[in-house]
Image (cartoon, grey):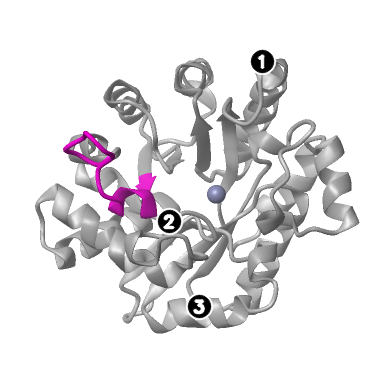
Amino acid sequence: MFAITLMYFDSHTHIQFSAFGEDYKEVIARALASGVGLVNVGTQRDTSKRAIEIAHEFENEPVYATVGLHPIHTEKSFHDAQELGIGEKAQEFTSRGEQFDFDYYKKLAEDKKVLAIGECGLDYYHLGDDTKKKQAEVFIAQIEVAKAVGKPLMVHCRNAFPDLIQLLTTHYQLLTAPHPGIAHFFTGTIDDAKQLLELGFSFSFGGAITFPPRKGKTEGDYDAAIKYIPVDRIFSETDAPYVAPALHRGKRNEPAYIIEVVERLAWLKGVQPEEMKAQIRENTKRVFRI
Ligand SMILES: [Zn+2]
């Protein structure tokens, strides 16, 4: 349950990644001291398991986990030292990718500190046509895990919204009603948002929404989507260690920086920051059932 002092919620972060290997406890303590609860999101076997271990290290705190296989790890994989470190094991993992093991993930997913399944979905940015079929299969398998344990999906989608929406529509019967999941770091169009809203999805936004408009533009890249999506379908995230908000841009991101994201969301929705905070708390309780 939410502690009285919990004001903010980072619904997508990765404090179990190598980038926080030395100081993850301090980073989480800083978040909690700022009133920020958080969900460490798994991306493959080890980061999923580690997310659960950390959630139990902070047993009575609002520190949670998700478990899943990121689409970029379904085949010969994109290597990110911030995620996996730089050792031999990390290199070996990225050269072979991971075979999705339904039973392994289902067992992890049953843990009471696990709030959702993912991040899972489709990513056509890092990987090309040859992996599309594999990504779809692994995504469907994770939709089945979510159904089996009755938890929502934490969806990652990059350059693949038409295919993602088609897959979700085809497998609509398998989605966990009435809140099938969250499209994290949403980068789609207004039409993509409309279709995902109709499927029952929510959306989370992070540090990138605080960046000034690109040269020649009058609006930030995410402003139109945020203005369009109803306030009861909006979540806040950091996606740490990536994409720190404007005041910390270029540095390692962390959950305590979520406050800047929530202030920007409030401004774009034309509400007071207090109201935005309260709304996100409501959304978090409703979708994650905490
Ligand atoms: Zn992520």
Q: Is residue 1 visible?
A: no
Front residue (pair 215, 75): 215
Q: Is residue 183 placed above or below 67 in the rendered structure?
A: above
The CA distance from mark 1 to mark 3 is 42 Å
Q: Marks 2 and 1: which is nearer the front?
A: 1
Task: Check disc 3 and give the amino acid type.
Answer: Glu
Q: Quadrant of residue 126?
A: top right
Screen quadrant of the N terminus: bottom left
Q: Quadrant of residue 220?
A: top left
- Residue receiving disc 1: 129
Which residue is under mark 3? 61
- Could you tell whether 193 is left or right of 229 in the image? right
Among the two numbered marks 1 and 3 on one chain, the one whose residue lies closer to the N terminus? 3
Residue 217 is inside the magenta segment: yes
Residue stretch in magenta: 204-220
Residue 115, x across and y down, in percent: 53, 55
